Amino acid sequence: MLSWFYAVCSQITIWLPFNLVPISLQPLPIFLLSLLIGWPAVTAYFLCLFQASLGVPFFAGFQGGMLKLLGPTGGYIFGWAFAAVFLVLIRNYKKDSFIITFSKLLVATIIFYTFGLLQLSWFVPNEKLFILGVYPFVFGAFLKNIIISYVVSKYKKRF
């Protein structure tokens, strides 16, 4: 069920007319649930990736298949998986204050942007890489990280 929830969240997007990569809500539940419930959230994301790789339309714009994973947005999609694993591995490392959680999410964000930019670099010139692959998304990532940090710092002790 959680993999399908991730798929629904991936459909909540803002398509930028000048860009190959949309703004997606999908990282928010992946990162939030990785910090709150741990490995089940990551396992569900890997299941979502598997289903989508078989062609189930779980990616933004109701797309799926291996070609999508190998396209301009595939690095971000894989990067979320690596970032989620990172978050689960360190989720109990320190008390989950707002600042500590935000710091964890900042590192996770760097992880998924790294994967995203590596793959996006196959499709866009290097001089436009940050203009197309980072700058349009910084505010949204910052906002998502604030929301997640607030929720985790308030509610993690209940999980």
Image (cartoon, grey):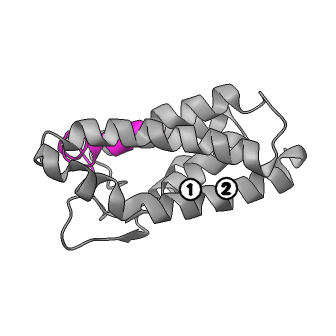
Residue found at the very far right of the displayed protein: 158
The residue closer to the viewer here, 30 or 52, is 30
**Residue on which the image places disc 2:** 148
Residue 58 placed where, x, y %?
A: 37, 54
* Circle 1: residue type: Leu
Residue denoted by label 1: 28
Q: Is residue 86 magenta?
A: no
Q: Is residue 47 visible?
A: no
Q: Nearer the viewer, residue 83 or 53?
A: 83
Which kind of residue does numbered mark 2 sit on?
Ile
Would residue 53 be found to the left or right of residue 26 on screen? left
**x%, y% of residue 131?**
25, 58
The one of 144 and 85 positioned closer to us in this rendering: 144
Query: Residue 145 location in percent, x, y?
Result: 60, 55
Return the disc, 2 or 1, that comes first in the chain's sequence. Answer: 1
State whether residue 151 is above or below residue 96.
below
Marks 2 and 1 in Cβ contact (< 8 Å): yes
Q: Is residue 130 visible?
A: yes
Determine the residue positioned at 60% across, 44% down: 105
Q: Residue at x 28, y 53 (%)?
A: 133
Whether residue 75 sits left or right of residue 20 in the image: it is right
Question: What's drawn in magenta, residue-wise?
Answer: 63-80
For the image, the number of numbered tags is 2
